[in-house]
Image (tube, grey):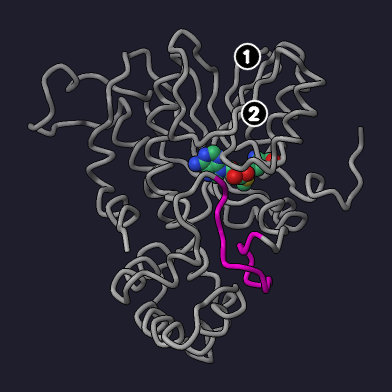
């Protein structure tokens, strides 16, 4: 069935799908996990190959309808779970040929102005992708100046974080900040007027969204669990959209691969010579200029993949320790 151009599902173009298929080689069949189902772009393409099956996850219950349609068409070749990928706990007897993460927001989420992800909306400040403990409105109206500054600076790399945080506190003293346009106005008034490279609100909105959805903890737990359910030789594919995500993925793939010397004297003897991944070449794959033209969202996408080794799984605690400063910030409570 061809979807009308106006349907939200049709609006989301899967990023680097050719590259993902080349890595996953579904023409030979296989069992795949799509950890970020979204509009189902990757799942649908994988299922076009007859001997494949796909298990898909998404934290957002708005996509269950799309998943139900796929289920009707592919029956036992397709399963969907409305859950976060940090909770990816499967029967360890099922092993996958590839596990794929396409991080961030889908166009379905961004274009639904009622969800408050877009700074073009005038709706309530929500920004939840689903299954979150707090909304952006709670964060903006109840966190102290230092917490807001830390969140905006660290997760948004925003130079004016301090000024934005102070102005949020000042503004909310007279009236609660309920909507995205209220926040946009505060950010605009806090920023240097000559700042023209990207929209003034981009970095702050990204920071609040990462915090609300605990995206750093999700990624660390998600890729850890994914490596547990991969077959030897299976591929872990991650497409990230900002530098913090890419830093985490790069560290994970490099540090736990065979060609990295893990000389850390504090490592327990039983895991010193074990690896999660085969030799890792530290290569980033980017969208072609043609794709960027037809799908601007792909401009900032970075694809990395690593191949699971034959070795047994061990918990990559060093990954958690390395990025604890970020996960601790995500855990801050007002
Ligand atoms: C960029 S979209 C994926 C689009 C999909 N690859 C496609 O082509 O249609 C990212 C999706 O991942 C979901 N997501 C983000 N973080 C998640 C998490 N921690 N657990 C499960 N799903 C998550 C979002 O709700 C969103 O639907």
Residue at coordinates 49% horizontally, 19% vertically from top-left?
Answer: 234
Q: Callout 1: 10 Å neighbours few (<14), some, many (20+)? A: some
Residue at coordinates 56% horizontally, 59% vertically from top-left?
Answer: 127
Query: Is 136 covered by the magenta stretch?
Result: no
Residue at coordinates 72% horizontally, 31% vertically from top-left?
Answer: 67
Q: Quadrant of residue 313?
A: top left
Tell me the tag on residue 30.
Answer: 1
Looking at marks 1 and 2 on the same chain, the residue that comes earlier in the sequence is marked by 2
**Pointer 1 with pointer 2, Cβ within 8 A:** no
125 sits to left or right of 322: right
Q: Nearer the viewer, mark 1 or mark 2?
A: 1
Give the vertical position of 121 relative to 20 (above or below).
below
Give the vertical position of 127 relative to 121 (above or below).
above
Q: Residue tagged by mark 2?
A: 22
Query: Is 119 covered by the magenta stretch?
Result: yes
Could you tell me which quadrant the C terminus lies in? bottom left
Write the start and end of the magenta stretch as one range: 115-130
Q: Could you say where residue 85 lies in the image, as x and y percent from the top left?
A: 49, 34
Give the vertical position of 263 relative to 116 (above or below).
above
Helix, strand or loop at mark 2: helix
């Amino acid at each position: 069935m061809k979807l009308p151009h106006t349907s939200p599902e049709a609006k989301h173009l899967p990023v680097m799908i050719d590259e993902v298929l080349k890595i996953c080689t579904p023409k030979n069949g296989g069992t795949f996990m799509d950890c970020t189902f979204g509009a189902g772009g990757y799942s649908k393409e994988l299922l076009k190959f007859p001997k494949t099956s796909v298990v898909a996850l998404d934290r957002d219950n708005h996509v269950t309808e799309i998943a139900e349609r796929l289920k009707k068409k592919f029956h036992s070749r397709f399963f969907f779970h409305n859950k976060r990928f940090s909770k990816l706990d499967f029967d360890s007897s099922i092993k996958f040929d590839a596990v794929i993460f396409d991080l961030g927001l889908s166009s379905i989420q961004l274009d639904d102005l009622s969800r408050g992800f877009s700074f073009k909306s005038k709706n309530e400040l929500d920004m939840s992708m689903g299954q979150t403990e707090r909304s952006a409105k709670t964060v903006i109206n109840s966190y102290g100046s230092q917490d807001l500054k830390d969140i905006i600076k660290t997760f948004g790399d925003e130079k004016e974080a301090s000024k934005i945080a102070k102005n949020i506190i000042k503004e909310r003293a007279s009236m609660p900040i309920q909507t995205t346009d209220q926040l946009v106005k505060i950010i605009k008034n806090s920023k240097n007027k000559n700042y023209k490279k990207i929209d003034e609100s981009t970095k702050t909105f990204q920071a609040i969204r990462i915090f609300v959805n605990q995206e750093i903890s999700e990624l660390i737990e998600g890729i850890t669990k994914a490596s547990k359910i991969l077959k030897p030789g299976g591929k872990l594919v991650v497409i990230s959209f900002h530098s913090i995500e890419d830093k985490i993925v790069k560290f994970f793939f490099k540090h736990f691969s065979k060609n990295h010397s893990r000389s850390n004297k504090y490592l327990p003897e039983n895991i010193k010579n074990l690896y999660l991944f085969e030799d890792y070449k530290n290569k980033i794959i980017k969208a072609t200029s043609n794709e960027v033209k037809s799908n601007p969202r792909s401009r900032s996408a970075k694809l990395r993949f690593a191949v699971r080794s034959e070795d047994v799984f061990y918990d990559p605690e060093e990954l958690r320790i390395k990025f604890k400063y970020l996960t601790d910030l995500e855990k801050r409570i007002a």
